[in-house]
Image: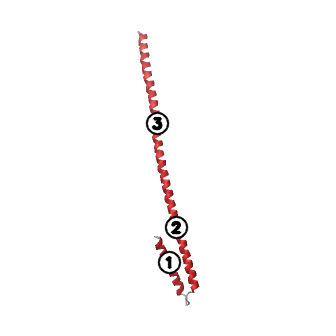
Amino acid sequence: MKTPTWKSLIMSIGFGVLLTAGCGQNDPPSVKQSRAIAAENMQLQKQLDRSYAQIENLKEQYDQELEKRQKLLEKCQQERDQWKAKSRQSVRDQVKSVLDSVMADNTRLREENARLKAQIEKLQK
């Protein structure tokens, strides 16, 4: 509800309370009592207005904090994605390095094997 609606509701309730309280009495309320009640109503209205202002302020702070945390979350997700990509690339590089080493050793061993076979064949003749 909007603030003016709440204000009118509070004023209506206050007016209804005044009327109800006055119905049970035979004597009309004194001017002094009426002024005291009116002053109290005004004080309560001011307090209600301050409460509404405080609620709006808290809502703004909440929205700002929510936006700040959303940005932080997005930043963290981007960093996570970057680390994943770096990790994958590092694994690829390591696998390639090991594979290159194995292939080089394999080639070297095949050449050595062929050379040794040739020596054995030469010795057998």
Image coords of residue 60 (percent x, y):
50, 61
Name the residue that disc number 1 marks: 11
* Image height of 120 relative to 88, above or below: above
| Mark 3: secondary structure | helix
Structural crowding at the residue carrying mark 2, measured as other residues with C-alpha within 10 Å and reported as few (<14), some (14–19) or many (≥20) = few
Which of pointers 1 and 2 lies earlier in the amino acid sequence? Answer: 1
Q: Which residue is mark 3?
A: 91
Whole-percent x and y of residue 58?
Answer: 52, 63
Query: Contact, CB < 8 Å: mark 1 with mark 2?
Result: no
Q: Marks 1 and 2, how far apart in space? A: 19 Å
Residue 107, x across and y down, in percent: 42, 23
Count residues near mark 3 (Cα–Cα under 10 Å), then give few for <14, some for 14-19, many for 20+: few
Q: Nearer the viewer, residue 93 or 115?
A: 93
Marks 1 and 3, how far apart at CA = 72 Å
Which of labels 1 and 3 is toward the front? Answer: 1
**Mark earlier in primary sequence (1, 3):** 1
On residue 53, the disc is 2
